[in-house]
C-alpha cells in the first residue's frame, strides 16, 4: 500500500536551481523546496568550483546576482575568484559587480584591472563610480596607465578619467599629472606625459614645466629639453630617451642644442629626441662640411638618379608609388625634415662604400640560409660616417620578423636608425623591399628612423628608408658584389 500511495508523488529536485532559467522555473512553480539562501550558497560553491566548465560557473554567478540578497559570509569566498589567474573574465566581472554593489573592501587593484576590459556599459559605469567614491592616491599610477592606453577616448570616458584623477589628487588633472612625474613614488611617468602631450598645447605645457621645481630625473630632463630644445616628449619612449641622455650625455647635448637652434632658425626645424645622435655627431665632426637643404636634396637626388639610370643628375623624376604609397625622393624632398635629409645622405654614402657592400653580400647570403628569423641591427654615425652593426635577434619567430635584443633597445636611444634585412630565397619581386607593417610599427613605437635592405636579384640590394611618421623613401638599387 505504501508503494501505491507514493506512486503518484513528485520527487523533489536533486539540487537547487543552477541557472537563471531554472531559477525562474522554480519561482513560477511556487516550490518551497529551497530557500533563496540555500540557492545562493549552493551557487556560490559552484562559482568557486574550478572543475566545472566556465559557462556553468558563469551561470551560477548570474543566479547569485539575480537573487540580490546579502550573504556576507560568502563574499570572502567569492573574492578569491578575482585572484585566480585563469578565471573566466565574465565570471570575474560578475563577482566584481556584486562585491562593488556590496561595498566589499580591498577591491582597488581588481577594479583598475577590470576597467580596460569591461565592455558592458553598466559594469564600466559601476567601476568608474566606485573609483570616484574611493579616490585612493595609491591607484593613481594604474589609472594613468589606463588613461594613456585609451588613446583618443570618447568625451564621456575622457571626462570620467579627468574627474577620477582630480578626486585622487585634490587638484586639476594636468597639475596632478605633472606633479606625479615629479614624485619619486610614481611609476607611470611615460603614460602621464602621453596623456598631457595629447591634451595640452606644447606652448602651455612648456610654460607649466618651466614652473615645476624639478626633483626627479624625469622632471629634470623634461625641463632641460624644454629650455634648450623647445621640445617636450610626447610618448613614454621619448621621455625615457630624454632621461637617459640627460643623465649621461650632457656635453653632447650642448653640441646638439646649438645645431638644432641653427636648423630651427634656418629651416623651421622642430627637434625630436631621436635626432640627438645625428645632431651631436654632426656638430662634433670638424671634417663634415655643413650643407644647406638645397645642397642635401641635390646630392641625394644625384645618387638616386644615377642608380635609376637617369639621363642626368639634374633631371627630376616623376613621382613613384608602391601600391598607393608615394616612395620617390624627388616628390617628397621638400616635405622631409632636415634630419631626414641628413639621414638619407649619410645612409646613401654608407651603402656606396665597398666594405659595406661586401658586408651586405655576406649578410644576405647568411640570412637567406637562416629561415628562422630576419637579421637586423642599428646604424650609427662614427668617425665621420654612418656605419651599421648587426644585433642578433633575441627570439627567432620566423623569416618575416626581427625581434631586437635588449642591447638593441638600449643602444637605439643613441643611434641614427635601425635596419632590417629582407634576404629571402628565391628572390621575390621589388615589393620584397617594402617595410612591413611590423617594421613601420617598430619605427613608431621606438621613435626611430629605419632602413630596409632587400635582395632584388642575386647581386643587388634595394634600400628603403622610413621614419616614425610612416614616410617611405626608395633609395634605389645597390650592387652587392662590388
Image (cartoon, grey):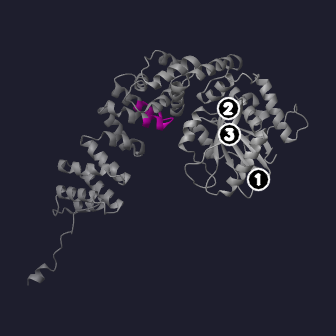
- Contact between labelled residues 1 and 3, with CB atoms less than 8 Å apart: no
Pointer 3: what residue?
Answer: 388
Q: Main secondary structure of the magenta part?
A: helix
* Left or right, 422 with reference to 10: right
Q: Residue furthest left?
A: 1
Local secondary structure at mark 2: strand
Q: Quadrant of the C terminus?
A: top right
Which x, y percent locates residue 351? 76, 39
Residue at 21% x, 69% y is 14
Which region is colored magenta? 145-161
Tell me the tag on residue 429: 1
* Spatial CA span between label 1 and label 2: 31 Å
Q: Give 40 or 340, whichever is nearer the viewer.
A: 340
Within 10 angstroms of label 2, few (less than 14), some, or many (20 or more) residues?
many
Residue 408 counted in the magenta span: no
Local secondary structure at mark 1: loop
Please tell me whether residue 454 is drawn above or below residue 371 in the rendered image.
above
Q: Give 367 or 99, whichever is nearer the viewer.
A: 367
Pointer 2: what residue?
Answer: 381
Residue at 26% x, 45% y is 99
Residue 4 found in image quarter: bottom left
Residue 157 counted in the magenta span: yes
Which x, y percent locates residue 135? 31, 31
Residue at 72% x, 21% y is 286
First along the sequence among labels 2 and 3: 2
In the image, which is nearer the foreground, mark 3 or mark 1? 3
First along the sequence among labels 3 and 1: 3
Within 10 angstroms of label 3, few (less than 14), some, or many (20 or more) residues?
many
Please tell me whether residue 196 is drawn above or below residue 435 in the rendered image.
above
First along the sequence among labels 1 and 2: 2
Please tell me whether residue 3 is drawn above or below residue 238 in the rendered image.
below
Residue 103 found in image quarter: top left
Amino acid at each position: 500500500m505504501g508503494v501505491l500511495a507514493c506512486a503518484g508523488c513528485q520527487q523533489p529536485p536533486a539540487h537547487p536551481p543552477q541557472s537563471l532559467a531554472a531559477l525562474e522555473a522554480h519561482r513560477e512553480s511556487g516550490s518551497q523546496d529551497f530557500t533563496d539562501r540555500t540557492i545562493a550558497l549552493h551557487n556560490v560553491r559552484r562559482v568557486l568550483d574550478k572543475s566545472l566548465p566556465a559557462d556553468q560557473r558563469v551561470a551560477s554567478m548570474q543566479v547569485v546576482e539575480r537573487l540580490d540578497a546579502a550573504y556576507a559570509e560568502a563574499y570572502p569566498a567569492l573574492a578569491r575568484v578575482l585572484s585566480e589567474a585563469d578565471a573566466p573574465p565574465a565570471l570575474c566581472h560578475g563577482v566584481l559587480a556584486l562585491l562593488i554593489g556590496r561595498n566589499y573592501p580591498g577591491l582597488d587593484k581588481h577594479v583598475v584591472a577590470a576597467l580596460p576590459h569591461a565592455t558592458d556599459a553598466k559594469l564600466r559605469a559601476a567601476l568608474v563610480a566606485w573609483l570616484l567614491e574611493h579616490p585612493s592616491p595609491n591607484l593613481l599610477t594604474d589609472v594613468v596607465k589606463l588613461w594613456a592606453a585609451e588613446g583618443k577616448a570618447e568625451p564621456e570616458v575622457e571626462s570620467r578619467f579627468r574627474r577620477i584623477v582630480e578626486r585622487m589628487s585634490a587638484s586639476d588633472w594636468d597639475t596632478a599629472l605633472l606633479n606625479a612625474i615629479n614624485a619619486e613614488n610614481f611609476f607611470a611617468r611615460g603614460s602621464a606625459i602621453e596623456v598631457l602631450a595629447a591634451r595640452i598645447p606644447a606652448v602651455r605645457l612648456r610654460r607649466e614645466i618651466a614652473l615645476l621645481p624639478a626633483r626627479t630625473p624625469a622632471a629634470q630632463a623634461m625641463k632641460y629639453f624644454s629650455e634648450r630644445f623647445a621640445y617636450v616628449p610626447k610618448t613614454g619612449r621619448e621621455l625615457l630617451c630624454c632621461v637617459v641622455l640627460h643623465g649621461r650625455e650632457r656635453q653632447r647635448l650642448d653640441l646638439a642644442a646649438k645645431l638644432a637652434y641653427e636648423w630651427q632658425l634656418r629651416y623651421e626645424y622642430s627637434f625630436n629626441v631621436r635626432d640627438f645622435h645625428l645632431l651631436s655627431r654632426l656638430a662634433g665632426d670638424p671634417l663634415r662640411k655643413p650643407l644647406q637643404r638645397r645642397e642635401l636634396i641635390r646630392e641625394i637626388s644625384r645618387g638616386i638618379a644615377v642608380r635609376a639610370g637617369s639621363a642626368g643628375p639634374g633631371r627630376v623624376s616623376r613621382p613613384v608609388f608602391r601600391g598607393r604609397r608615394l616612395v620617390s625622393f624627388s616628390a617628397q624632398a621638400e616635405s622631409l625634415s632636415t634630419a631626414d635629409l641628413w639621414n638619407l645622405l649619410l645612409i646613401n654614402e654608407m651603402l656606396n662604400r665597398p666594405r659595406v657592400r661586401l658586408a651586405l653580400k655576406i649578410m644576405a647570403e647568411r640570412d637567406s640560409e637562416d629561415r628562422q628569423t630576419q637579421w637586423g641591427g642599428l646604424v650609427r654615425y662614427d668617425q665621420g660616417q654612418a656605419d651599421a652593426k648587426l644585433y642578433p635577434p633575441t627570439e627567432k619567430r620566423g623569416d618575416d620578423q626581427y625581434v631586437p635584443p635588449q642591447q638593441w633597445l638600449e643602444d637605439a636611444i643613441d643611434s641614427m636608425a635601425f635596419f632590417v634585412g629582407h634576404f629571402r630565397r628565391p628572390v621575390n619581386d621589388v615589393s620584397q623591399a617594402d617595410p612591413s607593417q611590423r617594421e613601420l610599427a617598430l619605427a613608431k613605437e621606438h621613435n626611430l628612423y629605419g632602413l630596409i635592405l632587400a635582395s632584388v636579384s642575386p647581386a643587388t640590394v634595394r634600400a628603403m628608408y622610413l621614419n616614425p611618421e610612416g614616410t617611405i623613401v626608395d633609395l634605389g638599387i645597390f650592387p652587392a658584389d662590388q
